[in-house]
Image (cartoon, grey):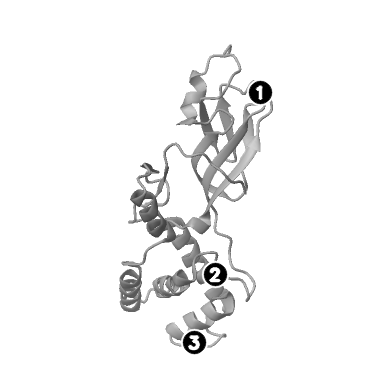
Amino acid sequence: MDLLTMRSTLRTKVGSPSTTDVTDATLTRIINAAYREIGAKYPFTELRCIKSFVTVAGTNRYTVPTDLAVLFRVWDDTNKRKLAKRGVRYLATIPLNLADGNPTAYVRVKDWIQFVPTPSSVLTIQIYYLTEVADLVDDADTPVLALAWHDGIVYKARHIFYDERGDVGKAIYAKSEWKDWVADKPSEIDQEKDDLEDVGVVVESLGNEHGGGRRGARRFMRNADFDFTG
């Protein structure tokens, strides 16, 4: 469903107001708000990405991709091991004379990550992360989410529309409709993990980094290699 179709559908669902009363720009903004909220709250394979980069000997800080929203995992592909995630305060505990070597940990701060210890050689690092949802702008733009979720964006947008206008009764109804729609909607990750479990692969929960949605399908293979780049 493209933006034009979603906007037309939403306009119908909110009583078909004229473009004078409710502009296309307003509906587009609300649709994008719904799109971002769904993308951040529920797990989708389309919004998860693995990218690679190489380190430089003696350099410990590296810029993360601009579309990175949540960093799930950092993997040293050269030495085939996961790096431990540390908080910002960990940086203050690093000895000034710490020798360079193979990193065992990393710290994420804003738009960069720092490796500890500083890499002493060229390493291939792979990061697994949640991407930011890009707003729909042109009428022909379509959400990256699976087609089955496009209707859900409209349902959520209707709730946002009435909530912004303070129409409590309609907002409550629209929220109820949204909750009924999404209650039994599986995500691609929900569906694909069944195959992993059927073949006996051990999976690891990624915790609650991804917006606190009700579905706990944030899983990734514990010791699997990252075998593709973006």
| Quarter of the view holding residue 189 | bottom left
Disc 1 marks which residue? 121
Give the amino acid at mark 3: Pro
For marks 3 and 2, the one nearer the N-term is 3
Q: Is residue 185 above or below residue 199?
A: below
Question: Please, what secondary structure does the residue beneath circle 2 have?
Answer: helix
Q: Residues within 10 Å of mark 3 (few under 14, many from 20)?
A: few
For marks 2 and 1, the one nearer the N-term is 2
> Residue 29 got which mark?
2
Q: Residues within 10 Å of mark 2 (few under 14, many from 20)?
A: some
Q: Is residue 188 left or right of residue 78?
A: left
Mark 3 vs mark 1: give the one in front.
1
Q: Residue at x 47, y 26 (%)?
A: 89
Disc 3 marks which residue? 17
Give the amino acid at mark 1: Ser
Q: CA distance from mark 3 to mark 1?
A: 62 Å
Q: CA distance from mark 3 to mark 2?
A: 16 Å
Give the amino acid at mark 2: Arg
Percent of width and height locating residue 60: 62, 27
